[in-house]
């Protein structure tokens, strides 16, 4: 009976995490890992392994819908992914040298700043001016909420690449997931509309998670009894999240992401201060 209750709880929370992750481009795994460790008291490596599977499931379900709806900017995703993956590898190597607590405090402060900007919002996202030279990435999609065709051009591509490298590096060090950092970078710095940024990030986090998941699978950290309800819940939630996002205003998504960023900033501060030990 207890096992069934645990499976039901994982499934229910997976629906919630998957929907939030798909709407905001976080992948859902960053919420699941907190649930695994704080609610189920799982060992860190096992929680991370299950979280990676959750990210892959969320990205696969949400990504397929976003690509079909032409909201994911695949060209932008592939360009930025080269830097985030490189940064993640660098972060894993740096983690054994630098004090992780200092990085956690710094990232927490950055997330607080980004969350304040997200919650404050803007009256309209507008359309970024087309770059005058260098690498150009454009995109467009139909906004189901407004019924308008949104066209945009990514700006500050060089800065975006540098920040993506840093984001991947920090993500590799603190293990919080790249989507939490990449969505604000794309939306605030590169002026990608919030919905396109979330859809593109949703695709990116799945690629990154898939590269890491094999390591944990080979080490035997995946518990299939916990993985099955996790993946089923996440996939159902991710599909619901993609349907909800189309009907929600961009400014609402920005503010929701802002509150999620505050949550993860607090988690980082507690980890840096030793309150949380995972």
Image: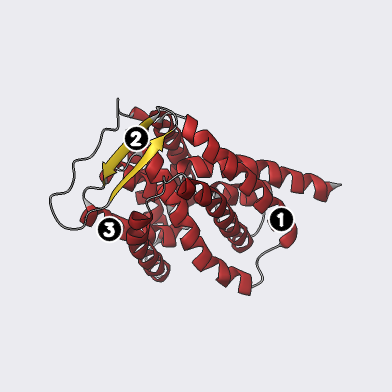
List the residue tagged with mark 1. 228
Residue 205 in the figure: left or right of residue 78: right
Question: Viewer-nearest of labels 1 and 2?
Answer: 2
- Which residue is situated farthest in the right direction here? 1
List the residue tagged with mark 2. 149
Q: To which quarter of the image does residue 133 belong? A: bottom left
Question: Regarding mark 3 in the picture, which secondary structure is present there?
Answer: helix
Q: In 3D space, how far apart are the residues under numbered discs 2 and 3 (Cα atoms)?
A: 27 Å
Going from N to C along the chain, the mark reached first, 1 or 2, is 2
Q: To which quarter of the image does residue 238 belong? A: top right
Question: Viewer-nearest of labels 2 and 3?
Answer: 2
x and y percentages locating residue 261 in the rendered image: 43, 40
Task: Please tell me whether residue 173 is drawn above or below residue 41 in the rendered image.
Answer: below
- Which residue is situated farthest in the top direction here? 123
Residue 119 visible? The answer is yes
Q: Which mark is residue 190?
A: none
Question: Regarding mark 1 in the picture, which secondary structure is present there?
Answer: helix
List the residue tagged with mark 3. 161
x and y percentages locating residue 177 in the rendered image: 47, 54
Task: Please tell me whether residue 193 is drawn above or below residue 159 in the rendered image.
Answer: above
Going from N to C along the chain, the mark reached first, 2 or 3, is 2
Question: Regarding mark 2 in the picture, which secondary structure is present there?
Answer: strand
x and y percentages locating residue 84 in the rendered image: 37, 61
């Amino acid at each position: 009976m207890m096992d069934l209750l645990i499976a039901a709880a994982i499934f229910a929370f997976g629906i919630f995490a998957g929907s939030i992750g798909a709407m905001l481009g976080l992948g859902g795994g960053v919420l699941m890992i907190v649930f695994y460790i704080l609610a189920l008291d799982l060992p860190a490596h096992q929680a991370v392994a299950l979280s990676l599977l959750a990210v892959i499931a969320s990205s696969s379900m949400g990504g397929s819908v976003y690509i079909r709806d032409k909201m994911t900017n695949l060209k932008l995703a592939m360009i930025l992914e080269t830097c985030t993956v490189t940064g993640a590898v660098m972060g894993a190597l740096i983690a054994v040298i630098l004090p992780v607590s200092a990085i956690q405090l710094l990232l927490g402060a950055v997330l607080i700043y980004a969350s304040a900007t997200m919650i404050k919002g803007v009256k309209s996202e507008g359309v970024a001016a087309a770059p005058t030279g260098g690498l150009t990435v454009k995109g467009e999609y139909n906004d189901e909420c407004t019924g308008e065709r949104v066209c945009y051009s990514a700006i500050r591509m060089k800065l975006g690449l540098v920040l993506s490298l840093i984001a991947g590096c920090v993500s590799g060090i603190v293990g919080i997931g790249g989507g939490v950092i990449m969505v604000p970078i794309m939306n605030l710095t590169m002026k990608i509309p919030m919905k396109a940024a979330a859809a593109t990030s949703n695709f990116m986090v799945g690629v990154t998670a898939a590269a890491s998941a094999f390591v944990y699978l080979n080490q035997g950290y995946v518990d299939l009894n916990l993985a099955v309800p996790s993946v089923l819940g996440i996939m159902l939630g991710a599909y619901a999240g993609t349907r909800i996002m189309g009907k929600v205003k961009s400014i609402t998504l920005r503010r929701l992401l802002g509150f999620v960023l505050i949550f993860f900033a607090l988690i980082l501060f507690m980890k840096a201060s030793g309150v949380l030990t995972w």
